[in-house]
Image (cartoon, rainbow, N blue to C red):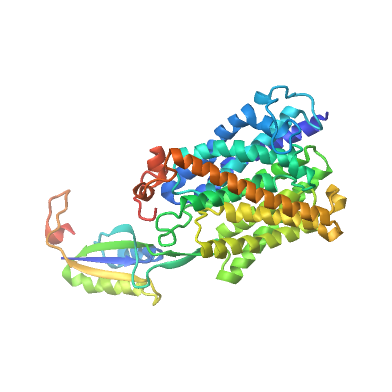
Amino acid sequence: MKKVEAIIQQEKLEELKVKMADSFEALGMTVSQVLGFGNQKGLKEFVRGQEIITTLLPKVKVSFVVLDEEVEEIISLILAICQTGEVGDGKIFVYNVEEAIRIRTGERGAQAI
Amino acid sequence: MEAGNIAFIMICSTMVFLMTPALAFFYGGLERRKNILNTMMMVICVMGLASVLWIILGYSMSFSGDNLFVGNFDKLFFNQVSMTKGDKIPEGLFAGFQMMFALITTAIITGAVVGRMRFSAIFLFIAIWSIVVYYPMAHMVWGGGFLDEIGSIDFAGGNVVHISSGISGLVLAIVLGQRREYRQTEYRPHNIPFVVLGAGLLWFGWFGFNAGSALAADGLAIHAMLTTNTAAASGMLSWMLIEKLAIGKPTVVGACTGAVVGLVAITPGAGFVSLWSSFVLGALVSPFCYYFISFVKHKFGYDDALDAFGCHGVGGIFGGVMTGLFADPAVGGKTGLIYGGTELFVAQVASIAFTIVFAGVASFLIIKGIQLFMPIRVSAKEEALGLDRIEHDETAYPTFMGLDS
């Protein structure tokens, strides 16, 4: 099992959610609001003509726990939807997951995800 | 005594009162999340403090006696103030209308000091400042005092309200020093819709402020209302234009700021300048204030947090000088420089210079005096935690996790 975690632009969330639901029959996702910066180190804004550097920008973090063979498909889907070529598109991380347990039934492993 | 005048000034008084909570929203929205309650509290506390002081001694010190610099104590607690008799309107109503000016003026000062001043210190400062600066200023300008005698004019409070509070705010900001991590961290407005709400209500209240200063429901009041709206409108548009040219996009905070500086600038001349002058006045005050806020403040490094000086001090000085330039004898009977009257212009410049020095020196002495008895600034750690928690044990947004405080 793998955990695919993508930090994406806020405006891409809805599209990603719909495409994921269409493409995978059984797939859960967890979404959190996060703040952060990448290489660009934020955004320039103006208040009364004074420049303000906003280093921590709001982003959305979506994570999925999937079977090993589904990882590449999910990555391609995220890339297809979230890649604009502009600065701030985000990043994808993939982790190994040791165990998954569904609390309601006690099922483990592949059955639990 | 006309019932119409009485009704009009009563309504104007409540409109001017509304400007104080409006300013709380305007300032509150501009400040950071963790300091909004403290910012609003510094503004609204004057609704209690300045009202009480005005009844006890403020009106008497401002509007009784023939002294040049300050009134006397003949009308303490509104003693001998008639609720039925007076010039144009009952004296009690005039005193009530003027009370609202005392509220908003002291509230303006606090915009310079948000984010780092101890609440007890600013509270004490406002109380002493009202007695030492505001009441004498009101007496000198409107109570038959020295600035009236030298021939300067101030329709609704350029010197008394805006220059005095703006300069005092600047002095406090300098004495207090910059906020922690000033210019390093993200000092951005946390709730711009509040800024719009505040600016809108200020604009509304300003009709009472300026039109009501005619003290009658007459042609002069109508004129003042129209010049007020025109200056605010052109101030807003010219600020938007500056931002479009300077940074590419007009901002909402900028549009609101432009309207407010337009209102500040027309205040001293609302009943003296013609309508076309109010248009020019509003259009020119925005670049003037913009320059101070975006360039001069940066250059000198003083931390006038919400631009109390940049908007009210600078806008008030500009408006006072422009009144000396544009006063139209056909409107309020005073002749400005462009109509050939040099005397008024000289008197305006002199009264502004006096106000700057008087309010500046007095504020410096008051705050230094307070500093002898108590710390005027919170500690670095308290500043980092936010003044809502430190000074009031309240939080405006309890679920907020603090990442963009």
Q: Quadrant of the N terminus of chain B?
A: top right
Q: Please give left or right for residue B278 compared with residue B131 in the image.
A: right
Q: Is residue B316 above or below residue A90?
A: above
Q: Is residue B62 above or below residue A54?
A: above
How many badges with numbers are in the image? 0
Residue B165 visible, this orientation: no
The residue furthest top is B80
Q: Please give left or right for residue B184 compared with residue B331 in the image.
A: left
Residue located 52% across and 40% down the image = B125
User: Which image quarter: residue B215?
Assistant: top right
Q: Is residue B11 above or below residue A55?
A: above
Residue located 74% across and 24% down the image = B83
In this rendered view, identify the residue nearer to me: A18 or A56: A56
Please provide percent x and percent y for residue B266: 72, 52
In this rendered view, identify the residue nearer to me: B127 or B12: B127
Residue located 52% across and 48% down the image = B172
Q: Please give left or right for residue B314 compared with residue B37 in the image.
A: right
Q: Is residue B60 above or below residue B202?
A: above
In this rendered view, identify the residue nearer to me: A105 or B117: B117
Please provide percent x and percent y for residue B181: 40, 58
User: Which image quarter: residue B232?
Assistant: bottom right
The residue furthest bottom is A85
Please provide percent x and percent y for residue B12: 70, 38
Residue located 41% across and 48% down the image = B34
Please provide percent x and percent y for residue B128: 56, 37
Residue B14 visible, this orientation: yes
